[in-house]
Amino acid sequence: MLQPTLESTLAGRYSLAWTSFGMPVFEIERGQLAQVATLLRDAHGFELLLDVTAVDRIGQQPRFELVVHLFSPALRQRVRLKAVVPEDDAVVPTLTTLYGSARFLEREAHEMFGIRFEGNADLRPILLYEGFVGHPLRKDYPMEREQPIVEYRTQP
Amino acid sequence: MEFMSVSSTLYDTDRFGAALPRFTPRQSDLLMVVGTVSHKQAQVIKTVYDQMCEPKWVMAFGACAVSGGFYRNYAVLQGVDKVIPVDIYVPGCPPRPEMVIDAIMMLQDRIAGDHHPILPFEAQNPERR
């Protein structure tokens, strides 16, 4: 099984490990993200960064949970890394030094959740537009709030 | 997809004189807004509408163009009539081809009964019943 192998590779670097629908999950410190990814890449060939996103656990402390998915083409296995991020200091070190695709995935996580990635120089929004206020995937973003670009017609 | 169905052989809008899709707004009379309009796309729709020559009409095709449909979120315009005037609304997700044909014919009836912006009134209304 993959889980015990990965657990021995990452020994001492995670606080919690479990298997979710066959996918190994590791809860780590956000500062350890790059080191853990390097270990996984070098030891087991996790060369592909599939996703960088976040979970907004509103009302809980710390509020955010960063979720990173890695894939190993050699093992044909995925792994999920989780790291909690507090709201008042929503900064995470970047993964761009390891994975080129992290540039865009981090840009998206930044515009949607307002998590800043230290070391990623280009955090311009991708899907959102200039002048958009707030982070729409945060749970406290009001659902009915509209930020139109084109001015609405006044009904005759 | 529904638009393809309505304009292809089985339903064939050509029969009602609503034919020849123009792929430039400058030559067209009717703008059919088919599908979800996001706030970013709204600028494009507005530009296309402004480029069309008078007289012009707009059909909101499907629930998303009519009211935003089930997309009630930060990204989607809640109905294309917030940005451009709409003459006829076709609900449905997706609308049946029969509904689109009905809408086209209703619009044609309305246009036929309308005051034409170019011809003098008498020329358009020779006899009033």
Image (spheres, helix red, strand yellow):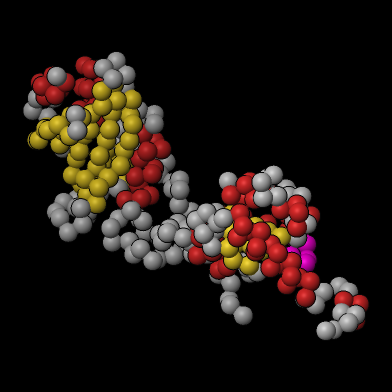
Q: Is residue A69 visible?
A: yes
Q: Please report the residue visible at 31 percent of the width from the left and 46 percent of the height from the top.
A: A116
Q: Please report the residue visible at 12 percent of the width from the left and 29 percent of the height from the top.
A: A13
Please give left or right for residue A139 compared with residue A152 in the image.
left
Note whether B121 is above or below B37 in the view shown.
below
In the rendered image, residue B56 lying in the magenta stretch gets the answer yes
Q: Please report the residue visible at 70 percent of the width from the left and 50 percent of the height from the top.
A: B12
Q: Please report the residue visible at 65 percent of the width from the left and 64 percent of the height from the top.
A: B103
Q: Position of residue A149 (x, y in %)?
A: 53, 61
User: Magenta segment, principal secondary structure?
Assistant: loop
Seen from the viewer's position, the closer of residues B57 and B37 is B57
Region of the chain picked out in magenta, as a range:
B52-57
Q: Quadrant of the C terminus of chain A?
A: bottom right
In the rendered image, residue A143 lying in the magenta stretch gets the answer no
Q: Quadrant of residue B43?
A: bottom right
Q: Position of residue B98 (x, y in %)?
A: 62, 57
Seen from the viewer's position, the closer of residues B17 and A131 is B17
